Image: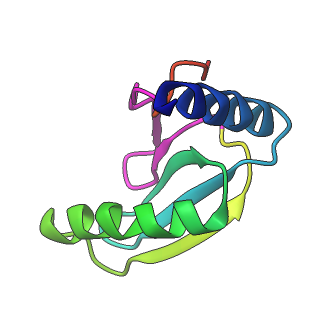
Amino acid sequence: MKNIWHNLKEGLISASNGLGLAWWVEIVTQNPRCTYYFGPFLSSVDATLASKGYLEDLEIEGAQGIIVNVKRCKPFVLTIAEDLGERIDRKVKPAFSGQV
């Protein structure tokens, strides 16, 4: 039964992301000047809960001036390093297999 729920959730997340309705965590740091996107998530609650771990990781790495936003969007690039003037594709494995 757990696999059925997991597959259903994957399908819902994939569909909502395809329509630009999925929830993402956007984290902007001032030092280094970067914007990170983590997701997609089915709900703002799921994204908010997950954001705590991303925030902790960035704090441990020494990032400063951190702003966290949970929003519906469809980012095409997951990391934008403004200090370096580049966009980095982190090649993050999705939380589910249906994401392209």
Residue 38 coordinates in the image, percent (x, y): 49, 49
Location of residue 36 with respect to 48 vertically, above or below: above
Q: In the displayed structure, does residue 29 sit left or right of residue 19?
A: left
**Could you say which quadrant of the image residue 76 lies in?**
top right
Q: Residue furthest bottom?
A: 65
Residue 70 coordinates in the image, percent (x, y): 61, 68
Colour theme:
rainbow
Location of residue 1 with respect to 30 vertically, above or below: above
Residue at 28 percent of width and 77 percent of height: 64
Residue 42 coordinates in the image, percent (x, y): 66, 50
Q: In the displayed structure, does residue 67 sit left or right of residue 21?
A: left
User: Of 37 and 64, which appears nearest the observer?
Assistant: 37
> Is residue 92 part of the magenta span, yes or no?
yes
Residue at 35 percent of width and 70 percent of height: 52
Residue at 39 percent of width and 77 percent of height: 66
**Could you say which quadrant of the image residue 89 lies in?**
top left
Q: Residue furthest front?
A: 1
User: Of 55 and 85, which appears nearest the observer?
Assistant: 55
> Is residue 78 part of the magenta span, yes or no?
yes
Residue at 66 percent of width and 59 percent of height: 43
Location of residue 72 with respect to 15 vertically, above or below: below
**Could you say which quadrant of the image residue 31 lies in?**
bottom left
Q: Main secondary structure of the magenta part?
A: loop
Q: How many marks?
A: 0
Quadrant containing the C terminus in the rendered view: top right
Q: In the displayed structure, does residue 42 sit left or right of residue 67?
A: right
User: Of 62 and 31, which appears nearest the observer?
Assistant: 62
**Which stretch did the figure color magenta?**
76-94
Q: Residue furthest right?
A: 19
